[in-house]
Structure formats: structure tokens, C-alpha cells
Image: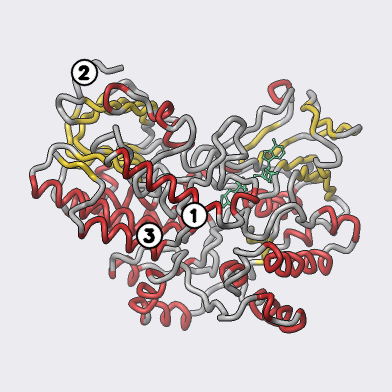
Amino acid sequence: MATTTTPTETVDAVVIGAGFAGIYMVHKLNELGLMVRGFEAGDGVGGTWFWNRYPGARCDVISMEYAYTFSPELIEEWTWTERYPAQPEILRYLNFAADRLGVKPHFQFSTRVVSAWFDDDANQWEIILDDGSVTRAKYFITAVGCLSTSMTPDFPGLSDYAGEVYHTADWPADGVDFAGKRVGVIGTGSSGVQVIPLVAQQAAHLTVFQRTPAFSLACGNRPLTEQELQDFKDNIDDHKIRSRASGTGQYTDTLECNALDHTPERRHAVYEERWDRHRAIDLIACYPDLFASREANETIAEFFRGKIRATVTDPGLAEKLSPRTYPLGAKRITLDTNYFETYNRDDVDLVSLREQPLHTFTTTGIRAGDADYDLDAVVLATGFDAITGPLLKIDIRGVGGRTLQDKWADGPTTYLGVAVDEFPNMFMLTGPGSPNVLTNVVCAIEQHVEWTGDFIRDLEKRGAARVAPVAADAQKWTADAVELADGTLYPEGESWYTGVNIPGKPRVIMSYVGGLDVYRQICDDVAADDYRGFAVS
Ligand code: NA7
């Protein structure tokens, strides 16, 4: 690997990915006057929103809040149509933003970065692309997203199955016609919960294979009114201040007393009022103790189960759909439109894989428990190798040829979730150890891009050739972040948050759980203290 090839191009910075993070990072580096090249595997911008184009794909953050705030022009010139934006609208927004910022010419699309190695002598990264060409750059910045490496379980017999197979995270651009077909969906996380009602409407018959039921909130999606849109634009400064001061980038009015301090009747009334707001953060952050105490959490978990019982007419089916094995919020709360209602249809069945384990695919379908299910098509809504997956898919080698795979064999170690010791001049946007997926990710991205951009400006001003975190600071940051997470209910979620959905992946929370507001302050303090914890030469 560590042989210098003749580069086709030498630039100041390479950015991988053209989603929310990559678009803004390229713009920021352009503003700094650096020569920047972006690489993107898709044939257009969008990142996660480019590939996740399954029917029903929709963001779980309100549209106006799921948008860049750094540019008054972008805010003024874009108008959202729905409260929760669907994938095509987010993709249109990102195309609009990339065009308006003029970043598309800096990207090379339909190009995958295969490997990158740090040249110790030249203090440069050599980036090797899937067409064999090579680019050299001083700075190597990953904007690869947290949910961009899809996960297909190693189901026995899958390769022998003769029917159609689709993964929600890699959906055909031209769509799929399920009319008249017997379809199976495996997975009931956010993607499954969104795709199931729409597949049910089209297919002749739908069988849902559920391993763990979801806590799901009816999203109450609707068109936005002109008044709402105008009010938001008029109050954008207030929105920025409030989202920056919040732990998740989404503000809510958390009550001062604990859930367990209220009577059951009072609590129920509070939950009902919050349910009608159709916003997950308003429920999970309703009382301060909901995510700190299992007993408090059970009160809201039972409230959600009550909603399932009120919707699903068959009580046995309602119970199968009711989560009981993990606290609410420890797996991501899903947002849906008519998810539980779908199970009242005669042409939809549920197979609980806890009661009937999935043994194998056959040539004609799936064998689970004692039964064979004949299926013309199967949709895998089985999720992602999250956060570290997209980084480890690239063969990244730092000082002395050390691979990132080797460095992170026991779990990712980072400093501030943005840099790794032994990997100089490399910056990760929303990397492991940063607040990433536990926030409105656009807020996390803006903070990371702005902080990284400021740091690079500072390095260029000093004439620095090389920067990397000090190993001891990275180890401390990582250990402290893990300890912080151990004091929450996240480890009980058994989800992609902690890597347990991927066989063999180290089981560790990959996000900083202390809140985006606290994290922002720490990063600002590090910068003010002459980038404490980084060695610059
Ligand atoms: P998730 O949330 O990881 O959901 C994946 C689903 O697939 C979940 O229900 C899993 O059950 C199920 N799954 C995974 N592997 C298997 C196997 N081997 N057998 C049966 N079922 C399986 O991914 P999503 O794409 O829905 O959502 C990811 C994020 O994207 C989401 O949180 C939003 O932020 C957007 P399990 O729960 O592991 O028992």
C-alpha cells in the first residue's frame, strides 16, 4: 500500500461524501481559499438521502429544523412543503443547497474511495479511487455519514432464494412495483415501520417478520401553512439560539418535576398532550428522569403500549407488537404514518421471530418456526453498520501503515469524535465519540464543519504541516464518553447505537451522550486553549 503512485491531482483537501456534511465542508474550505476535491459514490448529492429512497422514507425531524442555518440565502430561498420531509423533498433541498453554494463542480460523482494512506514524509494523504486513480491532499476529511453502510444479515439460503430481494437503504432509483405480489418485510426499525404501510397498500399480501417490536409515534404529517413557514423565517435567530443551547439540536419544554412525582392521572394527561404534538423529543424529554430511571421510563413505555392496544383490533396481535424488552428511547423511537393500523388489514400478517425463529430462506420464500412462507419479493429493512461502518469500509492507514481497522479493533478511540491519534491531518465529521446520531444531525454537522474549518484556518495561518491528537487525550476522551453512556439507558437498547446489530462488532456506544450543547462548549474551550490535546508541528 505505502508506495507513492503518480497522482492525477494534488489538492489541499479531500472530502469524502456529498451529503449534508460534505456539501457544507466543501463550501467552508472554498471560503478559506483552499483547493478542495470531493468524492461521492452516488451520481449526485444527497448522501444517506440519495440511497434511502424506499417508499415512505421520511425524516424524523421537522423539516424546517432539518436544514442548514448558516446561510441566510438558503433559509430565505427555500420553502418546505410538509411538516416531516419525505426523501424526494430532502434530496431536492440538498441539490438546491449544493447549486446555490456552487459546490457541485468540486465533486467527482460516481466515484468510491477505496483506500487512503498517510505519507509520513510528505505529510500528505494519498487517496485511491475505485477507477485506480490517485489524489494527494494535505487534509483528509470524511463526511461519510453515520447510516450509509447497509447491513444484510447472513441469512442461510438467501443466495438460493429465487424471488426479488431489496434493501431499503439501496432502493432501485426507478422504484419497485409490488402489485399482485406476496411480499415479506424483515425488520421493524425506522425503515421497516415506514415502508410497511406502503407495501401493504400495493402488495397482494404482506408478511412482516418482526424480531423486536418498535416504540412508534404517529407523526401526524401534514402540509405546512404559509404562516408557519413565515413565522419560522422571521424567528430564525431565536431558533438558532435555542437549538444551539439544546442537547439534541431540538428544543423542547422539559418539565421541572420528575415523572414519578406526578400522579398516574396527571402523567397520562401530560403524555396525551405531548403525543398530539407528534414530535418524539417532546415525549422522551418531557420529564427529566425518563431517560435516567427505568421505573420512570416504564410509565411512558406503557403509555405507548396503550396506543398500540387502542389501534390494533386483535389484542393478541397488539401484544406481539408491543415492546417489552428495552426502555423507550434506548432504541431510536420510530415515526410512522398508519403503521399499527396496517396490521388491521386482512392481507397483512405478522410473524414474531422470537416465537418462530427464522431458520432459512428457501428457493420460494422463508422458513420460520414450523411454517414456510412463499414470497415473490422480500424487503430487507435490516439497518446499517452504523457510524464506524462507513469509515472502516475504506482501507485507511495512518502513521507507519497502521490500519484504522486495527486501531479500532476493540472499538473506536477518537479525540472529540473528530480526530484519531496516529492518523494526522484527518478529520471526521460526525465521527464516533461525537454527538452524531443522538442529535438533529444537521445541527451536529454544522458544529463539526464550522469547528473543523476554523481549526484548518488556524493551522494554515501558522504554517503547520501536521496535526494529530495526543494519544492520551484521545484515550481519555473515549473512556469518559463510554463512562457517561454507561450511566444512561442506551446500553439496554441492543441496537445499532451500540453496534450489537452487527455480529462481531465491539459493543460500545459510538456517540457522545453528554449533549450537543455541552459538547459544543468543550470543543470551543479546546480551541480557545490553543487546541488543547492536539500536537501541531
Ligand atoms: P434499524 O433501526 O437497525 O432496524 C433494523 C431492523 O431489522 C430491526 O427491527 C432489527 O431487529 C431487524 N433485524 C436486523 N437483523 C435481523 C435479523 N438477522 N433477523 C431479523 N431481523 C433483523 O435500521 P433502520 O434502517 O430501520 O433504521 C436505522 C436508522 O435510520 C433509524 O434509527 C433512523 O435514524 C434512520 P432487532 O431490533 O435488531 O431485533
Report the residue at 79% width, 43% height from top: 180
The image position of residue 345, as x and y in percent, is: 84, 56
For this view, does 165 lie left or right of residue 375? left
For this view, does 139 lie left or right of residue 45? left
Report the residue at 75% width, 43% height from top: 211
Q: Which mark is residue 519?
A: 3
Distance of label 1 from label 3 (alpha carbons): 13 Å
Q: Which residue corresponds to mark 2?
A: 4
Kind of residue sitting beneath label 2: Thr
> Which quadrant would residue 527 be assigned to in this image?
bottom left
Image quarter hosting the N terminus: top left
* Nearest to the observer: residue 81 or residue 154: 154
The crowd level at tag 3 (other Cα within 10 Å; few <14, some 14-19, many 20+) is some
Reading the chain from its start, which is encountered first: label 1 or label 3?
A: 1
Q: Which residue corresponds to mark 1?
A: 484
Reading the chain from its start, which is encountered first: label 1 or label 2?
A: 2
Kind of residue sitting beneath label 3: Tyr
Secondary structure type for disc 2: loop
The image position of residue 516, as x and y in percent, is: 41, 62
Identify whether 65 is placed above or below 481.
below
Ligand 1 shows up in the quarter that is top right
Image quarter hosting the C terminus: top left
Query: Answer yes or no: do the residues labelled 1 and 2 have beta carbons within 8 Å?
Result: no
Kind of residue sitting beneath label 1: Leu
The image position of residue 26, as x and y in percent, is: 26, 48
The crowd level at tag 1 (other Cα within 10 Å; few <14, some 14-19, many 20+) is some
Secondary structure type for disc 1: helix
| Label 2 C-beta lies within 8 Å of the nearest ligand 1 atom | no
> Which quadrant would residue 346 be assigned to in this image?
bottom right
Distance of label 2 from label 3 (alpha carbons): 38 Å
